[in-house]
Amino acid sequence: MHNVLWPAVRDQLEKKKRVGNGDLFKLVSGVAEIEAVYEVDQSPIGKTSRSTPGTYIKVFDEIRGLYAQLPVSRVRGYSASRFSFNAEGGRCETCKGQGVIKLEMNFLPSSYVPCEDCRGRRYNPQTLEVLYNEKSIGDVMEMTIEEAAQFFSAHPKIARALSLLVDTGLGYLKLGQPSPTLSGGEAQRLKLVTQLKRGVSRAANERIRKMRKPGSTLYLLEEPTIGLHMADVELLLNVLHRLVDDGNTVIVIEHNLSIIAEADYIVDLGPEAGADGGEVVAVGTPEQVARDRISRTAPFLRKVLSSSRVNKRLSS
Ligand SMILES: [Zn+2]
């Protein structure tokens, strides 16, 4: 997936033949059906506390725009950039909008203490005087994503993006939480939701949608469930299903049977691990692969499928 499929699709999309890649280029077919290809991993998003879930999903731009539209801002001539903690003007200059001060200590790892000037709120007092529904932009940064979705319910563009994060189980994160503190699973879901948000705004514009092929992004994920709790696996499945429902294609390398059982199509590689594997053992729907006599996955898959059938019968 990483060394053949991804570069081959990327090269065909970019209509580039890389040196020595000629055969690779010819390997894949069907690229005409897709618009873009993304590898989604658990690597951290943003290395500084200047990146937060709010800035990553771009919803913070909308929120800043809203604050700049308020009557007080207009009178004072505050533009949207005034409400950025990453630019001079509105931020606290003592901590440069970080809300914390880094303490360098000899022989000890550096640590952070809340900024005394803004008390961790990242902005200067003048900026914090601008209130929307009695809350300043600094208060908003302290809200969880779930609270913010409620708070901005009158603004569909902001509320919709935040609701997507709530739906995928990220509602407990604070809007202003520094991105480097997110877990691998949280970072991965945030990346996937950002993709979903693109899909939503596209769906909102029927005219553009008609001009384009529906959905049609190819997502590649390598063992996305590594390090995830069972509840997080469920949430990940929700996001993957939504991407597919929007008309996209998701290819996942996975050993986790909960994910395998929910696939539309399985390519089972084996029969054993490592050097004794690498052959295509079985292909088809989960039900078809579960009936295979050679596949090592089949017996486990049968168990998962029969228990999920029992669950479905019980719930209906
Ligand atoms: Zn400060």
Image (cartoon, grey):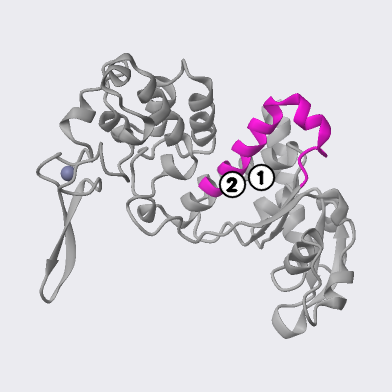
Q: Is mark 1 within 8 Å of ligand 1?
A: no
**How far across and down, in percent of the image, does residue 38 sit?**
66, 56
The residue positioned 72% from the left and 59% from the top of the image is 300
Q: Secondary structure at mark 1?
A: helix
- Let me know if residue 291 appears in the view: no
Residue 203 is drawn in which quadrant?
top right
Q: Which residue is denoted by mark 1 in the rendering?
A: 240
Q: Which residues are magenta?
A: 190-216
Query: Is residue 80 positioned above or below 28 on the image?
Result: above
**How far across and down, in percent of the image, does residue 57 sit?**
50, 41
Extreme-bottom residue of the structure = 275
Between the C-alphas of marks 2 and 1, the distance is 8 Å
Quadrant position of ligand 1? top left
Q: Residues within 10 Å of mark 1 (few under 14, many from 20)?
A: many
Mark 2 and 1 residues: CB-CB less than 8 Å, in contact?
yes
Report the quarter where the N terminus lies: bottom right
Q: Residues within 10 Å of mark 2 (few under 14, many from 20)?
A: many
Sooner in the amino-acid sequence: mark 2 or mark 1: 2
Q: Is residue 110 left or right of residue 223?
A: left
Query: Is residue 33 positioned above or below 54 on the image?
Result: below
The residue positioned 38% from the left and 31% from the top of the image is 80
Magenta run includes residue 25: no
Disc 1 marks which amino acid? Leu
Q: Is residue 148 left or right of residue 111?
A: right
Q: Which residue is denoted by mark 2 in the rendering?
A: 192
Disc 2 marks which amino acid? Leu
Q: Secondary structure at mark 2?
A: helix
Q: Is residue 142 left or right of residue 245?
A: left
Residue 208 is drawn in which quadrant?
top right
The rendered magenta stretch, by its main secondary structure, is classed as helix
* Closer-to-camera residue (286/14): 14
Give me the disc on residue 153: none
